[in-house]
Amino acid sequence: MVSEKELRERWEKLVETLADEGVVKSSSVRNALLKVPRYLFIEERYRSYAHVDEPLPIPAGQTVSAPHMVAIMLELAALEPGMNILEVGTGSGWNAAIIAELVKNRVYTVERIPELVEFARANLKKAGYAGKVIVIPGDGTKGFPPRAPYHRIIVTAGAPRVPEPLIEQLTPGGRIVIPVGSYHMWQELYLVTKTKKGEIRERRWGSVAFVPLIGEYGWSG
Ligand code: SAM
């Protein structure tokens, strides 16, 4: 078994490499990644691969994203302290914990698979984020109206289109980062902005590969 010290050293090296490559651009994302290593959010048997820059399996046939992908999405989101954030697709809870570090605020995250709701809650508790990240079971394509509007919405599964409820639950000046495209692991990363006047702008940031977003305003399953 790899020691905690070794896991941490490998993780720090990966974060520095991502920074050297220009994937991690801001010191805030760099520090948050260093503070929340991926090995705390995966099963024991995959822990020694946590620093490998690729997606890894989590229960229920889902994945935790590659570190470079998480960094790209967080940089696009341009998170700031005090923001109200919704994540759709909790998975392991890792990305939500990093978001909590960046906004220094409670983060709401929705997950449709009950087994992963439990997995993420257990990981978050172990890592010290139990009260800081609220995992909500359900269909995140409908957003989470009780805590709306959100300054940022980060979707970590691939959608056929931008779900309308997420646009409605965004503040003027807010952003959605979301992969949009096909069901089978090919999408483009969209940055959707709602202007102060309420107009919607979309920019595309290249090809990505995510598991499908399944729900009323996503894929039918
Ligand atoms: N952000 C996660 C992490 O840090 O581990 C990785 C997310 S994984 C790539 C995508 C997740 O989206 C899966 O856990 C999947 O069950 C979830 N998902 C898919 N459709 C969903 C929906 N409509 N609402 C909520 N979660 C959904």
Image: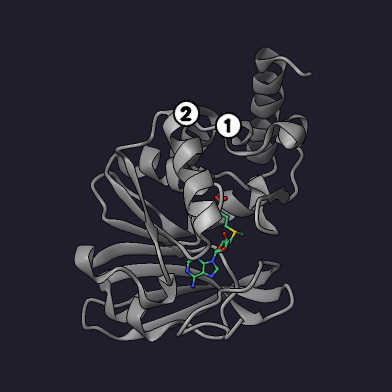
Q: Residue at x 51, y 70 (%)?
A: 178
Left or right of 201, for residue 83: left
Q: Residues within 10 Å of mark 2 (few under 14, many from 20)?
A: few
Residue pointed to by mark 2: 126
Spot occupied by residue 61 in the image (x, y as percentages of width and height): 70, 59
Residue pointed to by mark 1: 40
Give the mark toward the camera: 2 or 1: 2
Query: Is residue 42 shown above or below 169?
Result: above
Spot occupied by residue 107 in the image (x, y as percentages of width and height): 33, 50
Foreground: 112 or 170? 112
Foreground: 23 or 67? 67
Spot occupied by residue 120 in the image (x, y as percentages of width and height): 50, 45
Q: Residue at x 72, y 50 (%)?
A: 57
Would you identify the image quadrant in which residue 102 lies? top left
The amino acid type, in three-letter code, at marker 1 is Leu
Query: Is residue 221 shown above or below 173?
Result: below
Q: Secondary structure at mark 2?
A: helix
Query: Is residue 115 shown above or below 28?
Result: below
First reached walking from the N terminus: tag 2 or tag 1: 1
* Residue labelled 1 has its Cβ within 8 Å of some atom of ligand 1: no
Q: Residue at x 38, y 37 (%)?
A: 101
Contact check, label 2 and label 1, Cβ < 8 Å: yes
Count the marks: how many?
Answer: 2
In 3D space, how far apart are the residues under numbered discs 2 and 1 (Cα atoms)? 8 Å
Q: Secondary structure at mark 1?
A: helix
Would you identify the image quadrant in which residue 50 lies? top right
Query: Is residue 23 shown above or below 192?
Result: above
